[in-house]
DNA sequence: CAAATATAGGAATATTTATACAAACAATAT
DNA sequence: ATATTGTTTGTATAAATATTCCTATATTTG
C-alpha cells in the first residue's frame, strides 16, 4: 500500500530532524501530517525501520536511525581491486575473483593480513573473509586492497 | 562504590557476548554472577551505558552497546585446542587447522555438536562455525573443545 | 566532628512499548 | 468465482522499561 511506504518515509524524516522522545509524540506529529494510525502500528513501523530510543548525554531519550554501519538504506558499494571486487555484508566481507583464483588469493590474504583477518574460506571465484572484531570496514578494505593489489 | 563499577563492566561484557533480549534476562545472568540488584537499577545502568535494545533482521530484539564502544572492547582471545585454534567474530566462530584438515574436523563438528552448531563450512585450513542462536561463546568453546580434543 | 550535600538503589508504580488476536483486504492459485 | 494465503492494521492487553518517592550510605565542607 502506498500509504504505508509514505508513512515510513515520513517517520524517518521526522526522526532525523527532531528529537522525538517517545512514540506518542511521534504519533501526534504523524497525525498532524494527515496519517491515520495507532501506537501499535507505529511500534511495528519503528521495528521495521530499526529505529530505536537511545539515551543522550543529558538524561533524555531520543529515537534515532541505525548507525550507518548497519544501515541498509544506501546501497553498500562494491569496490574494485585489480580484477577482483570487495563488498561487505554485516561483519563479513566477500571478495569475488576470476574463476579458479579464489584459493590462491585467499592464501595470500591469510598470509599477509592475519592481524586483521580471522580467516578466509574460498570457493572457486568467491572468498568469504571473516574480519577480527574491532576492525571496521574501512580498515579491512584498506588492508585487503594492499594485499590484493600486490599480486 | 566498587561494586557498581564492576557491575557496569560485567553488563558490557555480557551484552557484547550474548544476545540479550530484555532486562530480566540480563538481571538473572547478573544475579548468577553474584550481583544483587533490581530491574530499576539495571534500567539506570543501561541508560548510563547507553545500551539500547535494537531489532535484528529476524523479529527479535537485542541489547547493544553504542557503536563507538565496539572498538574499545577488549581484544578477543584466540584459544588453542590441540594443534588448532578457535576465535570468535560477531556471532561466528572460526577454527584454524593444519592445512588440509579443515574438512575432516568440520565433519566431526557437524556430527558431534549438532545441538549447538547450526552448520560449518570448511576451506583448506579454516572452518567457519555458525552457532545456533542462544548459545554463548563459552558454551560453544566448551563444546568445540570437547569435540576437537577427542580427535 | 557535624551538618550539608550528593549518590546509589529498592519498592511500587507510571509510562511506554510490543504483541496476541481478530478483522479487513489484497493477491494468487484452483 | 472461490478458496487460499499473505499483509496490514486496530483493539485490547501483556510485557517491558523508566521514574517517583524514599531510605541508606557515602562524600564534602565548614
Image (tube, coloured by chain):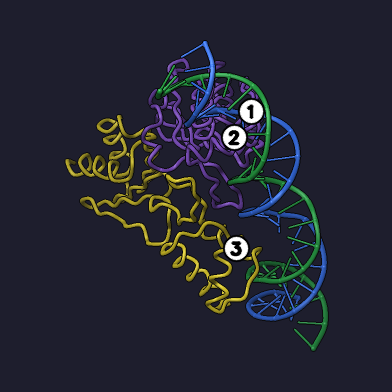
Chain colours: A yellow, B purple, C blue, D green
Q: Closer to the camera, B57 or B114?
A: B57
Instruction: Name the spot of residue A75 as percent of width and height, x first.
Output: 37, 61
Q: Which numbered marker is on residue B37?
A: 1
Q: Do marks 3 and 2 share a subunit?
A: no
Considering the image in quadrants, where does the C terminus of chain A appear?
A: top left
Chain of the residue displaying label 1: B
Q: Residue at x 30, y 49 (%)?
A: A97
Which residue is under mark 2?
B42
- Separation of marks 1 and 3 at Cα, in angstroms: 31 Å
Q: Residue at x 50, y 37 (%)?
A: B91
Left or right side of A22 for A115: left
Q: Which numbered marker is on residue B99?
A: none
Asked if the residues shown at circle 1 and circle 2 are in contact, with their CB atoms under 8 angstroms apart, the answer is yes
Chain of the residue displaying label 2: B
Chain of the residue displaying label 3: A
Asked if the residues shown at circle 3 and circle 2 are in contact, with their CB atoms under 8 angstroms apart, the answer is no
Q: Earlier in the sequence, mark 1 or mark 2?
A: 1
Label 3: which secondary element: helix
Which residue is under mark 3?
A24
Q: How busy is the neighbourhood of tag 1: few (under 14 within 10 Å), some, or many (20 plus)?
A: few
Q: Closer to the camera, D2 or B55?
A: B55
Instruction: Name the spot of residue A128 as percent of width and height, x first.
Output: 39, 43
Amino acid at each position: 500500500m502506498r500509504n504505508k511506504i509514505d508513512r515510513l518515509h515520513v517517520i524517518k524524516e521526522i526522526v532525523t530532524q527532531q528529537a522525538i522522545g517517545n512514540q506518542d509524540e511521534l504519533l501526534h506529529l504523524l497525525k498532524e501530517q494527515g496519517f491515520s494510525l495507532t501506537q501499535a502500528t507505529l511500534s511495528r513501523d519503528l521495528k521495521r525501520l530499526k529505529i530505536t530510543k537511545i539515551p543522550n548525554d543529558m538524561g533524555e531519550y531520543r529515537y534515532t536511525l541505525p548507525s550507518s554501519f548497519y544501515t541498509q538504506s544506501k546501497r553498500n558499494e562494491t569496490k574494485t581491486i585489480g580484477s577482483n571486487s570487495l563488498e561487505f555484508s554485516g561483519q563479513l566481507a566477500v571478495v569475488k575473483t576470476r574463476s579458479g583464483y579464489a584459493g590462491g588469493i585467499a592464501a595470500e590474504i591469510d598470509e599477509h593480513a592475519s592481524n586483521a583477518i580471522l580467516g578466509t574460506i574460498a570457493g572457486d571465484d568467491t572468498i568469504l573473509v571473516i574480519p577480527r572484531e574491532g576492525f571496521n570496514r574501512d580498515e579491512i578494505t584498506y588492508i585487503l586492497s594492499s594485499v590484493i593489489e600486490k599480486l
